[in-house]
Image (cartoon, rainbow, N blue to C red):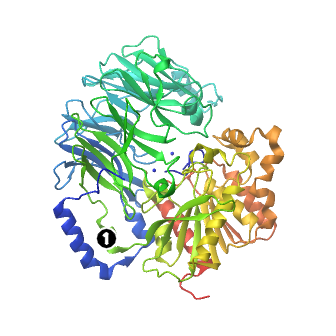
Amino acid sequence: MTYGRFLRIARPGIGRMRRKLGLLFWTLICCGALSASAAKVTIDDLMRLRSISDVRISPDGKRIAYVVSTPSLEDAEHVPVLYVVAAAGGAPLRLTYKTKIFNRPLPAPWLRWSPDGSLLSFVGFVDGVPQVMAMAATGGEPWAITTYKEGVTKYEWSPDGSQIAFLASDPTPPEEEQRKKEKSYVIEVDRNQRLPRVWVQSARGGTPKAISPPGQTVVDFGWAPDGRTIAYSASNARGFYAPYKSNLYLIPATGGDPRTLVARPGMNRALQFSPDGKWVAFISTGGYDGMVAAEDLHIVAADGRLETIRNLTGAREAWVGQFAWAPDSRSIFFIPYEQTAGTGDLMFEQPINRVFVDSSRIAPVTPPRTVNYSPSLSSDGRYLAYKSVESRTMGDVYLTDLTDGRASRLTEINSELRSLELGELRAVHWKSFDGKEIWGLLLTPPGYKPGQRIPLVVYCHGGPIGGFTYGIFPQFMHIPGQVDPYPSEAMASAGMAILFPMPRGGSGYGTAGFRSIIKSWGEADYKDIMAGVDAMIAQGLADPERLGVMGASYGGYMTSWIVTQTSRFKAASTGASVNDLVQEYYLSDAGDFIVEYFGLPWETGELLAAHSPITYVKNVETPLLIQHGENDHRVPLSQAQAFSKALKGLKKTVEFEIFPRGGHVNFEPPLEREYMRRNLEWFLRWLKPGSVN
């Protein structure tokens, strides 16, 4: 999950997971040996944790490549390293040393095997520019396949391995280069943008050829199995909105005029041909022209007959993030990045499901209470490799044998977690003001005994469409979790409970739940959260005199809103927060989403003001920490500046911090650590865990 779809920083299996006997035996011994001396979690502990950024199985199913990302305080970046591990298990082999895998702003290796399995490829830096690089599958020095001046970040091998296709913009015109040198270059808004196109070149190198027409923003693409055709998703929109207004096209791999495959309102993207070439699968809002919608998995006949379009996941109202065809073309494995309609405690999972093309029947592949990413299949369809996150982990590489459902964990990239005293993370639920059942996750301190009243901090998620999953960083298990400004695990170790509520408007209650807060941010969603707080007090857990609230992006909006509506909280921290909805429309790079929720400012100005925290700023009594990145384009810095200015003018208790070079999130580990450190310090100061009231 992310900070949410709009305000985003960019979720019963066949059987229980069965680890290799030796690894399980070793884990049990180590846990027993270390449990007596387990240490409390610190921010430095969190900053040492590693993440898996990509997983890819070889065509023969014998090897799995994956990338491990490690935060580096010294280099101020997340450092990715490529490994390969045998499907049979054993010690992983490190493959990259001097070669730097693409990591701007976070690792995005785009791992691929050549069709014959002899080469392993990824995106790496060559003289500071991202290029497609390849290396022998057995190891050795990587070499660059592309040398494109503008850089490459997304590519695919042709089915016969002789070519690659990639996305890149047109080269910078010489006159533009000259104007930049002369300091006379001016950005002409919506005019001099160079948009991504599809390019094709030989896998041996050479000059690439652009095959998609200029003027379209190409979002995704995929090869037909015969290698003669490329399908791509493109939009006439720019930037943030391009995927939400996209159609599908077919074009010869040698170039020519594109032919429309699917043209309808809304999102139509992330396409893949079936291995037999008969179908194209893609992610779509099903003709809904807007962003407050499910993004289901659809198929269409490769010849483009519109009557063949089918929604395979409509019954689930899924927000599909990744999918992969089974080699026999009879089923598709998919992962819902948001459990759009996953009810109850299912909303915190992110399973790998299998949907059958003929019947749309959906069967789970992974066990409950796991969060999964990056699925890929061996060419015979027997083995599925992926990243799997259990409740108290950062995720590891798993391999499932689909013939019997047996799964094996092949890595343990954060063995130090076994020596740390982690809190308990579990699903909870309560009744809201209107009787609706609302769910959330509750993290309690290590050793917590029911009946003890302790400080409770409410963590509001981003979005509005968004939510939490199991894992050490419950909002950020899909990327390096250190982008999370709130060190919930360290806060639990310090004696605080953390409530992660899932109010209506976010995931878990279907598209009707998404749309239930249209024209009403801060109404029912706010009441859902406060009902959760009351439930935690009624259970004897939360000390009503030591309540805190925090959140960023839409979670920042909700935090700012909460402290303008009630004085029950003794401390609050709001990050990347929307405080003025009118200004969000005008100044955000994604401001048009405000229209879908509220309408145009010149038509609904009073409604927007009525749901803006800054309108009620004089009501704030809670000490507030405001944090914001100086280069945030999703929620501009002016939102924080205005709120801080008003609070200071009213003589309220407020501290305001601007993070240099930070965007909607901070990607530099030193800033990430400082963000977490300040939040931990803030709540320790005001909530005083460990003291007795």
x and y percentages locating residue 406 in the rendered image: 23, 51
x and y percentages locating residue 684 in the rendered image: 57, 77
x and y percentages locating residue 598 in the rendered image: 74, 43
* 409 and 286: which is toward the camera: 286
* 316 and 603: which is toward the camera: 316
Q: Quadrant of residue 623?
A: bottom right
What residue lies at 55% left-to-right and 22% top-to-bottom? Answer: 175
Q: In this view, does 639 lie to the left or right of 36?
A: right
* 340 and 115: which is toward the camera: 340
Q: Can residue 625 be seen in this view?
A: yes
Which amino acid type corresponds to the residue marked 1 in the rendered image?
A: Arg
Which residue is outermost to the bottom?
Answer: 692
Q: In this view, does 207 lie to the left or right of 10?
A: left
What residue lies at 30% left-to-right and 26% top-to-bottom? Answer: 275
Local SS, label 1: helix
Q: In this view, does 114 lie above or below 253?
A: below
* 185 and 306: which is toward the camera: 306
Q: Is residue 657 visible?
A: no
Q: Is residue 230 above or below residue 411?
A: above
Q: In which quarter of the image is the C terminus?
A: bottom right
The residue indicated by pointer 1 is 418
Which residue is outermost to the top?
Answer: 256
